[in-house]
Image: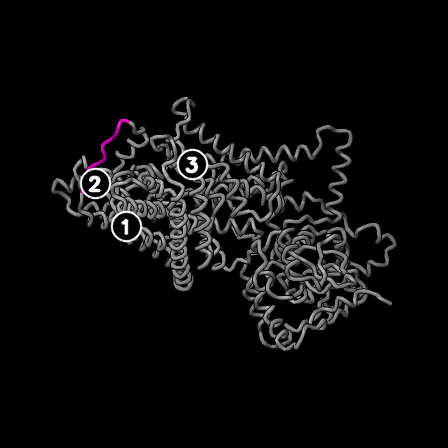
Amino acid sequence: MSEPYARKGGGTAHGRTPYRQVSQDDTDGSGVRRARLATWSKLPESLNFTTEENEVWRTKHAQLQYTNRNRWWTSHNAVVFKRWVLTFIIGVLAGLVGTFITFFTRKLTDYKFEKVRRVMDAEDEGTYRGSSFFCYLGFNLLYVSVAILCVYIEPVSAGSGIPEVKCYLNGINVPRIVRVRTLFCKAFGVLFSVAAALPVGKEGPMIHSGSVIGASLAQGTRGLFGTLGDTRVLEFRSDPEKRDFVACGAAAGVATAFGAPIGGVLFALEEGASFWSTQLTWRAFFCGMITIYTLYVVRTSEDLWGSADSTKMFSFGEFTYKTSDGKANFSVWELLLFTALGALGGLAGALFNHLNKRLTQWRMRHCASKALRALEAWAVCVVCSTVMYVVPCLWRRCTPKPLVQVTWTQFEKNLVEDLVPFGCPADSYNEVASLFFTDSDTAIKQLFHFRESGVFNQDVQTFSSLAIATFYVPYFLCACLTYGIAVPSGLFVPSLLGGAALGRLVGHLLHRLDAQSGTFADAGTYALVGAAAGLGGMARMTISLCVILLEATGNISNLLPLMLALMAARWVGNVFNEGLYDVHIHLKKMPILEEEVPAAAAERTAHAAQVMAADPVCFAPLVTVGDAYDVLRSCRHACFPVVAGGGSTQLAGTVLRSTICMLIQHRAFGAPGDDPTSRNDLRTRALSPLLSSAVFERAYPRFPTVDELDVSETDRGCWLDLRPYADTGPVTIQDCASIQRTYRVFRTLGLRHLVVVDAGNKVRGIITRKDLDHHTLEERLAWAANEAENLESFSVEAHPSTMARFSVA
């Protein structure tokens, strides 16, 4: 049997064995390539958002075309109908999961505070001195232990999941991120992490949960129960279909979390999906609509589905108060102040991201094991619980509760009842405890809606400047410390709460400067703008966050202040660092492809040949099972060019690693024997019957690995015909193409592999996602800058000769 590799394209007889040319990186002895490959081997694989157009694919569509003749209800109509039905189910399930999380989070939180307040009442009566703190801490440690257990069962359920979902929609196959077990651990764990009084939110996990629901439904019974795939959804068992369902699920998650269906669509477009279409926009909008409908049905069931009550939905409350003449309660010149507040939020967000980045780097070095991560989560819980109990204890001033006015709505009256006495008389409250010793949603509503405008005096104050500052600083630090520990957690609401406190503090100080005239807008308006600035400064979201806040507050008059604050927060924050989700993506070394070409490529004159993996392993059309198996064992390449054979390097197609493994596992190869090229019918017939597309669709996405293959000595001599399974129309690019064009082609088409060819269509290399990562581009293009410094003037010889491609004779 011939050797599996041949140097410099030498090949063996008939070019049937795979060959590989030797590149300089293999022989330079520096170990740079080996180190790079070792790093890449730890990164997740990419998704393939293109269709493999091989004979199996053509046969399937030819059969469908034959079946659909003279039918009004074609298979295409059936697929479209199933797609919309599944989108409907995603919306319903996302709404039910969100309702489950919201309901039980509130129950756990109320139960804890009820027990703690009983102990505090006993302390006021002179018994059980100091026991309220230990009761509070005990509940929090118990709750956080359950959250830690969920992460122990499924480690990827930690955090918000938004960076991972963003990577998935970008084309990175993050392991286990859309598994059903991840959904259960995320949804159940976030109940306890939020109830444990940690400065975390449930909104990010809701978005992740919606994405998992979308991915699972696209997989049928295999996605839900890990069994064989459901034949009724085989059409959706592919990376492009699964990606679109995940995007719809993410939109449904936002609709569930904030009651903002349009904001959900914009979130999936702005923060998630790298590949968008008009059809996907409609489906995401429909999914968000069904989610909101589900929330209305479930949460109004007690009233027999009567009038929708906003207090039973997620809402920050409507900003209904205006000036006496019906106009908005801010002046046009205050837009400059709102812009400045947005810039302040951008600075705070940049500081938060910087501190959390440093902390995460320390965690990655020193808290890598599960045991250490659990200990860290318990320690953070103790620190945060101590801060949230001790700081209100140090605030000894009791403030009389606001006098309820006749013009106040029931919503505003309920906020007065939610104020926390914390050792004060029944008609008074502790300002700091009312922000610390309640759930985050209620604290945000208090900062938004307690009225404080006009003439500045003690009677109209709800939260003093010192109380807000006393709350903001420790809460900011605790939120920074908490994000990244081993519990399911989000950062939307903590960022909104911190920003609302900062905004209300600014409004409060402005009122103090203008103590008599009542020139400035209500402090609640500044709290709303500050909330947008706080979240925008952290996540650098603009369009989607603006619409989410508008939908959650129901006041269109605040549109322009929100827009100005969000843009200012984004611009100022980007001066210092990236958004927090992007920071964590890069800390995990995910090869995400941003929309813009990396600066390393945009600022230099470089071409595809400088970044490609040169001289890739190639297959001839016919290869023995033994040679194919040896190649799979010796490398981790996910795609192989198929060349014309006979020692030629001319590209004929590409074949996936998973396809070869499927062929070997299903024994889809010919009998052992002599050279099969002597057969007269070889040009029109394959060596073995075709595997149908249904076989590949049922196996998706858990294709067999090379370690699962059982190849006997007899099998090694059999012949494997790759021609029916090779994509004969792969996307290619010329070796002289610029990096900018290469990057745009790769990202826009959602490729996993891009074959680089020369003018004669001969294979020169392959480009993958990891080759276009900005770190890799900087490394590989560094030599180009050094070469340019040695040139006295521009020379064509410094680049691949494109002039030689044209005949002028």
Q: Residue at x 70, y 49 (%)?
A: 52
- Vertical position of residue 276 compared to residue 574: above or below: above
Task: Give residue 323's position: percent from left, percent from top.
Answer: 34, 33
Residue identified by numbered label 3: 557
Question: Quadrant of residue 295 in the image?
Answer: top left
- Can residue 433 be seen in this snapshot? no
Amino acid type at circle 3 is: Ser
Q: Is residue 214 above or below residue 648?
A: above
Measure how far apart labels 3 and 2 are at the Cα level: 29 Å
Q: Quadrant of the N terminus?
A: bottom right
Looking at the rendered structure, the kind of residue marked 1 is Ala
Between 445 and 634, the residue placed more toward the observer is 445
Q: Is residue 446 magenta?
A: no
**Residue pointed to by mark 2:** 458
Image position, residue 467 (x, y; %): 25, 47
Disc nearest the viewer among 2 and 1? 2
- The answer to whether residue 405 is magenta is yes
Residue at (50, 37) in percent of width and height: 262
Question: Alpha carbon of mark 2 to alpha carbon of mark 1: how far?
Answer: 17 Å
Magenta part of the chain: 398-406
Q: Kindly tell me whether residue 27 is visible in this rendering.
A: yes
Q: How is the image coloured?
A: one colour
Instruction: Find disc 1 in the rendering and name its residue.
Output: 469
Q: Residues within 10 Å of mark 3 (few under 14, many from 20)?
A: some
Image-based side of 374 in relation to 175, left or right = left
Q: Earlier in the sequence, mark 3 or mark 2?
A: 2
- Secondary structure beneath dot 3 equals helix
The spot of residue 184 in percent (x, y) is 45, 43
- Residue 562: image quadrant is top left
Report the front residue among 412 and 492. Answer: 412
Left or right: residue 606 versus residue 182 is: right
